[in-house]
Each structure stands twice: as structure tokens, then as C-alpha cells.
Amino acid sequence: MPHMNPSLATSRSTGGVPRRLARAVVVALSIAASVPILLPAQRPSSMAGRSTVYAPGGMVATSQPLASAAGLEVLRTGGNAVDAAVAAAAVLGVTEPHMTGIGGDMFAIVWLAKPQKLVAINGSGRAGSRMLRDTLVARGFRAGSQQGAMSVTVPGALAAWDMLLRTHGRRTLRQALQPAIRYARDGFPVSPIIAAQWHDETAFLTRDSAAAATYLPGGRAPRAGEWFTNKDLARTMQVIADSGIGTFYGGSLGRRIVQRLTQLGGFVTLDDLRRNQPTWVTPISVPFRGYRVWELPPNNQGIAALEMLRLLEPYDLKAMGHNSPAYLHHLIEAKKLAYADLDRFVGDADHLDVSVEYLLSDAFIAERRRHLDPLRASERVDPGPSRTKSETVYLTVADAEGNMVSFINSIYDYFGSGVVVPGTGFALHNRGAGFTLDQGLPNTVAPGKRPFHTLIPGFVTRMTNGRDEAYMSFGLMGGGVQAQGHVQFLLNHLVFGLDVQAAIDAPRFRHYNGQRVALEPPISDGVRNALAAMGHVLIEQPTIAFGGAQAIVRLPRGYGAGSDPRKDGLAVGY
């Protein structure tokens, strides 16, 4: 800035007002400032706080920094994106134990650079052979919220990690588990958001003596910055590393799991563990604004995100304005329709009575779109508690060769079932709570069936020179918010042109059921009032309710990545 003469600067700063009068104004304002004035509370302008991360080689984005660092180290030492994803997922089972671990399920979509194609794996386990509907009804099973031994199904994550590595990785499971084993054995400082969520589960953890012994050292949850060690988990993972996954699926570790669950009234047998197999599946997709959006087929809710995009396709969303009343109303109403279809039509892929192709067909979508009132909130009741909870981690990895992994792992509720087999160091999930007791539906509970899942990794491709090429791997954890969160993130980026981090940061809505919807604080009071006038019932929810996203975009050279400020996570590359 050019040098200014002090007298000129003073003159300009008073707008030509004489200095004496200016001083009087300043004195008057100072006196006024000493008197308390009640001003309306100001909403924050955004959820932002981070920049997009760019890197020329590989990239990792997870919900916890130590997991991101572990994945990056794998990439830098010759591993590929699959190796890094499994290593990061294993670390998250140590550092974010209320969300994920080897006691849960997983799903992944993988872009293979060499053949230029997508592959996908369903690593969800099945109901135990003793999990009978009549038994659950007699014992008061609570669909959607059940925890304890009754809710435990076969954990499928570990077998899927192993299959991914053996098929598309360069490292063995033994190698991939080493960073997690070190953190479990030697300890790590707990990050702030995780510490707060962990603390909130103190009473729940005390219901199971082994859970309390594992996760409440000294009788309480670790605070932010305090070190936590889990030597039981370190030993368990070392046994798996040394002996292979057979110890879990029918071997000595499996026998301990079954014995404990049987004592507590669970339904999983040793044969159920032995029979567990991940499944390679074909991703499903729809075109959208020059891109193709990919999700996984049932038994998860990915189809709801695709149905929402198809329902919204004809509308001029950009003209409505980002997060305007009209825009949010249309998204909320589309969500209600798509989730209502989830409740009726989606469950184990082997038990569907309506095809995925039909649910995404022009005729079906057109019929559903006719139910979207552009001016009034529908009273339609979509899936209730059974579709609105889930504690999950999502991560994504890309390597220098162009391979990209969209990966999600979960134990369902915070600390899953709350059951820890003594001496093992990990919680078993409560994914059986995803079943319904209503008869005659694809998701009606039955032995050997996969329950409905909220877990949905996402991927985007775009057509170049007549063939699909990788564009973005993305995901948003958080139970029933996932599909509606996918759509909001995608529209932020693909329609409104926000960069990947800004698209993650943008404030979200979360529709629950009926007319109940939660909005993040930056959405203005004017928008809230307009939505209420349309019939939406606005409720307050904490930040965690709106999920946490990670995403990596492939650039002409290198990658760009974002990580959600609503979580402790980190995007990092080299």
C-alpha cells in the first residue's frame, strides 16, 4: 500500500468530518459501548474451517488423523490404495472404537486403474441360524434400536478386508494390521470429538463388564489428549495376523465369541461364522448432469441416493438457489419418497420382490415424482428409528497409479451391541437391529439373511472419449443421513460448483420422519421460517447427527481431497 500522509489518512478516515466532531462521536460511541445492548444472536455463516488438500501422488482421507497417517505411510512405502484403505480401517478400529472395528461389517467400491473399471464388495454378515422372528418377538426385540447379544449378527468386515487384499492388494493382512497393532499396544492420544462421544456412552458401557474393562480405564472414558491403550485388541489382532482370519471364522477366537454370545442369549453359532463369505457385487448407477453416480445394490440404502437424484433431475435446482427454501423443500420431499421405498422394497438381495432396475426406471420415477408437492410438506411417514441411527466410519484412498477406494466400516450404534468378549478388546456390532419384525418384507428377520444396511460408499465417473473414467470417491457416514447426505454433497459439487471441501462444509438438513427435519445452524432464520410455513416441523439436533464426509477428486494431474470439520479427520497426500 502506498505511504499516506498522516493528516490525509485522518481526514479520509473521518470522511471529511472535522476532527473535533469526530472525537466527540468516538467518545459518544465509547460511552454507548459500555451499556449492554441486546442484539439478535447471529448464526455462523458456514460449517467451514478447512481448505481442499491437493497432492501430486497419493491421497488418504479418513475421520481420524492417525488413520490417515497410517494409510499415507502405506502409499509412500509401495502399497496401493487397497492396502492403504485396509490399514487405515484397522487403525480406526483402535482410535475410533465406538464407531468401527473387526466386530462389524464393511462395504467398498474400488476403481481399478489398469482395467479402468469399478468393482465392489459386500462385506456384511448374516443373521445367526438361531435368529428366529418368533423368538425375537417373544423376547421383546426392538427393531432399529436393539443392542446386547440378541442384536449381534456375523461380523463380516475382517473377511472382506482379507478378500480385498488377496484380490487387489499388494500387502498381506498381516502387514496391513501392523499400524493398528502398534497403536493398540503402545497407545495413542484420543482426539477431541471422539473423546466427547466416548464419554457420552459411559453408562452404556458399564452394562457389560468386559466393555467397561476395555473402554473405561480407571472407571471413565479417556479425555481429549489422554492416552489410551488396548492391549487385548493388540493381542487379538496379532493372533489374526499370525494365524489368519480362520481363527475368527470358526477357530479359537470364534469359539470364544460364540460361547460368550450363547451365555448372553445370542443367536450366532460356530457354523454361522464358518459359513461367512464376502460377496463381489455389481455397483448400480444413474447418469446425472454429465456424470454417472455409483452406489452399491441392496442390502444397503445406496439406491435411495440414486432415486433422489432421479427424482430431482428435471428441476432447475441452481435457479432455486443453494439452501433456499424451495431448494431444501424439494430435496426433503424427494428424500421422503426414496426412503419410503427403502422401507418397503429393500433388504437382502436374495429376497427382493422388486428389481433395482424397476425402482430406478423412468416409469417408476415419474410416478413417484407426481407425489412431490412443490409447495407443501408431505405428512408421509418414512422409516422410523430403524433407519435413522448408525455409527460408522468412512474413508477413501487414491494412489499414484490411479486406483481409488471408497470404503465404509461400521459396528452400527455407538459401541455396537455393547458386548465385548472378555480379553478380545473389541465390541461386536448390533447390525441385527437393522431387521424388521414386520412379516412378508425383504428385510423381515430370518436365519442366514443379511439385514438392511445404512452403509453406502459412493463413487462418480464421467464419460471421456466414449468410456467412463474415475472422477471422485466419496462417502458420508451417519446412519439414515447417508443417502440424503450423499445427494446434498453431490449437488453442492456438481450443480453449484463448490470445490470438494466447500461441498463437504456446506450446511446440511437431515429429515427424520413425517414432517420433522433438522437444519444445521448456518441455515438462516428466514429459510427456517419459510420451511415452517410450508409445513415442515423444525427440530434441533447436534452436529454429529448430520454425518461426516470424506472425498477425493481425481484431477488431470494428482488429486484434491476434503475431510469433514464435523469429525476429527484429516485429508493428507504426498
Image (tube, rainbow, N blue to C red):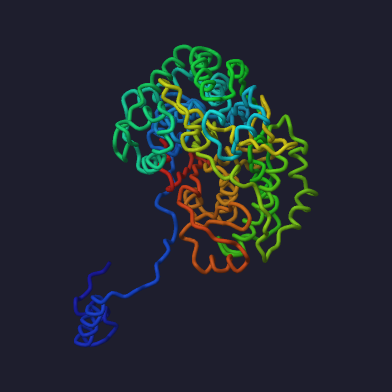
What is the x, y in percent for residue 227? 30, 33
What residue lies at 19% left-to-right and 87% top-to-bottom?
Answer: 20
Which quarter of the figure is the C terminus placed in? top left
What is the x, y in percent for residue 560? 48, 43
Q: Which sits in the foreground, 343 or 279?
A: 343
Q: Which sits in the foreground, 323 or 345?
A: 345
User: Up-down: is 454 above or below 514?
Assistant: above
What is the x, y in percent for residue 481? 56, 47
Say left or right for 447 vs 531. right
What residue lies at 28% left-to-right and 67% top-to-bottom?
Answer: 1
User: Up-down: is 503 above or below 344?
Assistant: below
> Residue 262's quadrant in the figure?
top right
Outermost residue on the right side: it is 363
Say left or right for 283 vs 367. left
Q: Which sits in the foreground, 460 or 62?
A: 62
User: Up-down: is 568 above or below 23?
Assistant: above
User: Up-down: is 170 above or below 40?
Assistant: above
What residue lies at 49% left-to-right and 57% top-to-bottom?
Answer: 540
What is the x, y in percent for residue 238? 41, 17
> Residue 66's quadrant in the figure?
top left
